[in-house]
Amino acid sequence: MNFFHRHRGLTPYLLLAPGVAWLAVFFLVPLGFLAYQSLQSGNIDFGYAFTWAWGNYWHAIRDYRTQFVRSLEYAGIATLLALLISYPVAYWIAFRGGRWKNLLLLFIVAPFFVTYLIRTLAWETILSDNGFVVNTLQSLHVLGPSGRLLATSTAVVTGITYNFLPFMALPLYVSLEQIDERMLEAAEDLYASKLHAFLRVTLPLSLPGVVAGTLLTFIPAAGDFINAQLLGSPDNHMIGNVIQSKFLELTDYPAAASMSFILMTGILVAVAVYARIVGTEQLTGTAA
Amino acid sequence: MTDQLTRRQLLQRAAAGSAVLTVPGLLAACGGKSKAGAGSTTSHKLAKTLNFSNWTLYMDTNKKKHTFPSLLEFQKKYGVHVNYTEDINDNASFFGKIQGPLSRGQSVHRDIIVLTDNDRYLALVIKKGWAEKLDKSAIPNMKNLVDVQKHPNFDRNRDYSLPWQSGMTGIAYNDTLTDPVLSVDELLESPKLKGKITCLNSMGDALTIVMLSNGDDPTNVTDKSFNAAFNRIKKAADSNQIRQFTGNDYAPILARGDLVAAMSWSGDIAQLGNKHIHWNVPKDGGALWTDNMLIPKGGDVYTASFYMNYVYDPKVQGLMEAGDPKRDITGIYYIPPVAGAGEWAKKYDPAVAKNTLIFPTKEMLDSVKIFDSKALNNQKYLTQWQNLISG
């Protein structure tokens, strides 16, 4: 008779314990501290004191509304682009990849063995004023002769899209791969056209992947600051840049903390609305 | 001598032996101004390891063997292993890393750190009492410190800090794309350069050269001179003359040709070694900034001071600065704060000794200014500046 047999009821809690402890120590406690800090006032010279300074929140929204909106906007566009790019790729790998599936997936993931910063810097070269991309666009008259991509919103959104692409592609692949192809055969047997079969069978069944992918892409993208820093100009800076500068350059910890909370709330609201529209069961895949 | 004595200092010096454990020994511990203290160097105990945190690419290097020759030499001579880490990328993040422990009175497990005087944190660390006093009795070579560095306004008598290396802030341009860009006027206002220049995101550097161009004094900033310089930069940013605000990431963009000219640090251009990229002090003057060594609270004062003395030997500094091509040693290529280093540099690498970006002429040094450290800690200025550069 071992311990687990005698205390069978405890087992689930014991199994949960490491995860809960991890979340408590590395997420809840810091989050609580951040909330505490966001209501402090003062400065680095004289120290900070807790004063219920709700004004921090109000000031953040008043002064940096543009950057908040811009962050959600860039992250939204990048997520949509990543979805449009990833879906056909994941679809093709799942249904036509055959024995090359694993290799093809590796191709998607391979660039991400290189660090985030280097990948973003590489885009600086790709989108360079004298580079291939800009020259081509200029000769096609998409860009004017003095036009450029670097230090524009296009470059920032491109960078974000690229950097978060695997977070979209992999969940999509998983949900597409699980689809039983006999269902598609059945649809065709019932005289559905290819398009119809896709719209009525494949797409709904892949929705859990779409939901997971969009969330995994949108959430980190909204808080990103590297792409805006390296590929954008101050006109393209996102709220992450402001938080970074408040925290590190200005040592205005309360302002930075309150902005982090506002961003978190903004993302939560956006996600809640999204979940409401597509239905939460899509996230867990219970509908499938 | 009202200096605070750390417990470690007191114990070290007390333990130095009965021969010196007398009044002079204790006097030496109080800041070491007494003659007897200076003579009792050998009685101080060197630690086995010196933990030194520095900026990247800031030490003489043997590229073939991947070693730091001057540090090896130090270890061989004095038996102190230097645990050398290049973990400082910018002042702000590094300050963020150490301010927590230091504010709680904990050690940051480093004996020497390096912070820049064109950023607010150096003055802040000293003002908050987070730096140990140097043991000047262990640094007789401090006499070699160049005059311009002797009395900075953040540390009037150099009680806490010693320069590691300096650099100048000026203008760099690419001669394949433009005529020489020699003044701030051209950089910020010439229509030919529109969208093809960058401005440094370091407030002190940018404001110094713009203030000089405005005819104001950057060593003593007033609201009026701040506003004039700030508005001029803001106008250039709003009109898209300035493409981006950058740290030293402008250098590869300039080399690639996406930028025609840039507000620039001399050392970046010296290290870049591209014959088409030229650097100059602007017509109305440039900025001088200096990275300073500090001993954070809890660091080993004697061993750290002893090492500082070593690098202030002109012979050692000359090699660190210029490197030695015969032994595959690459130098630091910034501006050394040690008088006489240039003479030794000539012996190791005459080309480097002649490079005015590394050993500037007197004329150049006379035309560069150190930014007002009070203004660097002015929250109003800082907030305005950050709002400009981060959107």
Image: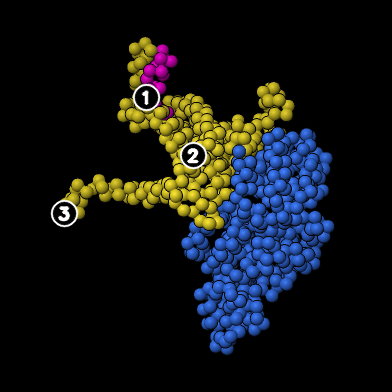
Q: Locate the C terminus of chain B by quadrant.
A: top right
Q: Which residue corresponds to mark 3?
A: A1
Mark 2 vs 3, N-terminal side: 3
Q: Which residues are magenta?
A: A193-211
Q: CA distance from mark 1 to mark 3?
A: 46 Å
Q: CA distance from mark 2 to mark 3?
A: 61 Å
Question: Which chain is disc 2 placed on?
Answer: A
Q: Which residue corresponds to mark 1?
A: A205
Examine the structure image and report whether residue A207 is included in the region drawn in magenta: yes
Q: Is residue A262 left or right of residue B63?
A: left
Mark 1 vs 3, N-terminal side: 3
Mark 1 vs 2, N-terminal side: 2
Which residue: 62% across, 52% down? B378
* Percent coordinates x, y for residue B327 in the rendering: 72, 63
Q: Are marks 2 and 3 on the same chain?
A: yes
| Circle on res. A58 | 2
* Percent coordinates x, y for residue B145 in the rendering: 73, 68
Q: Nearer the viewer, mark 2 or mark 3?
A: 2
- Residue ranking furthest to the top: A191
Q: Kindly identify the amino acid type of the residue bearing the numbered disc 1.
A: Leu
The residue nearer to you, when weighing B388 against A164, is B388
Image colour for chain A is yellow
Q: Nearer the viewer, mark 1 or mark 2?
A: 2
Q: Kindly identify the amino acid type of the residue bearing the numbered disc 3.
A: Met
Find residue B4 and report its image quarter: bottom right
